[in-house]
Image: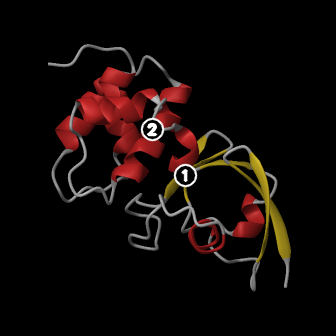
Amino acid sequence: MPSFTLNVNGESRTVEVRDPDEPLLYVLRNSLSLTGAKFGCGLGQCGACTVIVDNEAVRSCRMTVSKAAGKKITTIEGLGTHDKPHPLQAAFVAEQAAQCGYCVTGMVMTGAAALARKPDLSREDAQQALAGNLCRCGTHERILRAMLRASGKATA
């Protein structure tokens, strides 16, 4: 079986897979027990599986493990901790932006990548960044407020 070395949440992890085209999502969840990224649509359209790869939000259901090898991968488990959450995680809590929780990790990871690129983002920037993430619970307004809070903008 082929093996690949992945840099996940700052740690070098070697995984064996049956197929080099196995989705990164499956490797994260099944081989590394990092279950924060969720399987949603499997087509890269919902964003539930989003992780950050080399500072970009990536749909892990569409990226193969072979393409992820050698890149810096951050999952929700590596973004912040309970005692020291990422500013966007803290903002999600403050704005009560999570409902069912299924899409939340993808929203946070997409938002964190957007904030890393542009810390002073506007509401329009936040909307554009999250446009490809789906949430059926309807907490979009709270999610946008969380993004603005994390960027240092006052929320109302």
Q: Which of marks 2 and 1 is nearer the N terminus?
A: 1
Quarter of the image with the C terminus is top left
Three-letter code, disc 2: His
> Does 44 sit left or right of 5 as displayed?
left
Picture layout, residue 14 above or below residue 89: below
Q: Residue furthest front?
A: 83
Q: Residue 28: where, in percent of width, then height?
A: 61, 65
Q: Quadrant of residue 152?
A: top left
Q: Measure the alpha-carbon separation of dots 2 and 1.
A: 19 Å
Which residue is at a point 29% across and 55% down the rendered structure image?
Answer: 101
Secondary structure, mark 1, is: strand
> Does 127 sit left or right of 114 as displayed?
left
Which residue is at a point 65% across and 66% down the rendered structure image?
Answer: 32
Picture layout, residue 74 above or below residue 155: below
The residue identified by callout 1 is 51
Q: Nearer the viewer, mark 2 or mark 1?
A: 2
Q: Residue 58: where, in percent of width, then height?
A: 56, 53
Q: In which quarter of the image is residue 127?
A: top left
**Foreground of the two, 61 or 37:** 37
The residue identified by callout 2 is 82
Picture layout, residue 17 above or below residue 138: below
* Colour style of the rendered protein structure: secondary structure
Which residue is at a point 45% across and 38% down the rendered structure image?
Answer: 82
**Foreground of the two, 19 or 97:** 97
Three-letter code, disc 1: Val
Q: Give the crowd class for mark 2: few <14, some 14-19, many >=20 residues within 10 Å.
A: few
Quarter of the image with the N terminus is bottom right
Picture layout, residue 106 above or below residue 119: below
Which residue is at a point 47% across and 58% down the rendered structure image?
Answer: 36
